Amino acid sequence: MERVEVLRSLLQLSCEDKYITQLDGELTTYFDLLTGVIVESNDSMSPYSLASDEMFILTLKCLVNFCARTDLAKRLFECSKAKRRVDLLTCLVSFAFSDVKEDSRNLGTSLLVNLTTISEWVDIFCNEPFANIICGKFINKRSPSCLELKLILNLTSSARMRRYICEERSALSTLLRLLSEISDAESRMAIAGIFRNCSFEEEYHGRICFLSNDILSEVLVRLCDQSDDISEGDRSKLPDRVREVYELKIAKREEDVGVKIALCESLLQLCATKDGRSHLRSLGVYFILREMHRQECLREEELDKSGRKTELRAQKGLVYTIEQVVDQLICEENERPGFKSLRDVPLDAQTEEKLEKVKTDFVNVN
């Protein structure tokens, strides 16, 4: 009972930065206590018992609050021994992906999300079998929660996790199909972010493009709209799924600007390789982006007139990204340097600075 009272008091303190600062000298001791409770409880109780155990739940809540700060998530890593780190993740994965009630599970997932905002925890996660376990459960799940999607997004900061997802043929297809089904913009943003991260893996561009046409079809469906003016001849070049939404008059472009930017950035990453560029051209991506650019420029003008600077800055960033993709698609291959990847093209510091200035000037809002 005494430990429960301590945890209740600690939970109150963990909600306020000013109190956390006062605890600074004792945090290592508290972190050892909290992680010890998690590991020891998991060793002696089933997930169902843990979900109703007040001490375990209070401990999770305390750690979620503390580790919402990245500096404290890193401090927890640094003050924990290697075995304790692995044991902690093992317990959290077991609990978060069990069949206990959702609000209890979410505490475990929230802590995993907070921990994996830093690379040290991600590295442990992806070097152990946890990533495979989570992906396996996730791929077979009809509708993952927003927290689960955020966890996968964090883990795709690791090349190992990105490759694992790309090698699982159905993983990206399953994910991207949800873009048209999920109403929550935060969840769609996580999905778009996962695809963008996976698109960095150039060795898998062929798999993304050629082995799974449905992957890019789901992306393009989110970028097209019924107002698009695309001729019948040009529409015939589009994937079947995209032509279908046009013909059924249900084409509706993604509303969230952040999601649109992430999806267009994914296409830009695919443009780094010849395989990627060629396949995007063959799918008629240019025609969709041409119409999208026209509509998004009109939106930019509206925001400029309204003086909504934050939204305008994001909108200008979207227009800039669309133009970057279009530039790659209309450029002839024989005009390009002879590198396997555009990322391999050497740029001196002065050129990089000029390119960055062009982007900054483009999206700048006065």
Image: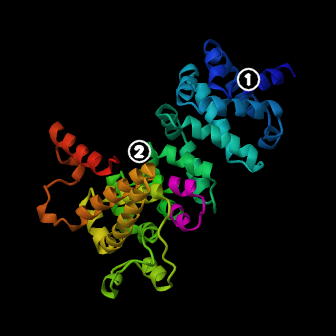
Q: Would you say 234 lies left or right of 62 here?
A: left
User: Which residues are the magenta region?
Assistant: 175-190
| Closer-to-camera residue (127/19) | 19
Determine whether 101 is above or below 63 in the image: below
| Closer-to-camera residue (218/128) | 218
Q: Is 227 inside the magenta-drawn segment?
A: no
In the orientation shown, which residue stands out farthest toward the bottom? 232
Task: Look at the image and tell me in which quarter the N terminus lies.
Answer: top right
- Check disc 1 and report the residue beneath it: 10
Q: Position of residue 284 (x, y in %)?
A: 32, 75
- The amino acid type found where label 2 is placed reads Ala
Majority secondary structure of magenta residues: helix
| Closer-to-camera residue (17/42) | 17
**Label 1: which secondary element:** helix
Q: Would you say 128 lies left or right of 11 here?
A: left
Quadrant housing residue 238: bottom left
Residue 15 visible here: yes
Quadrant housing residue 2: top right
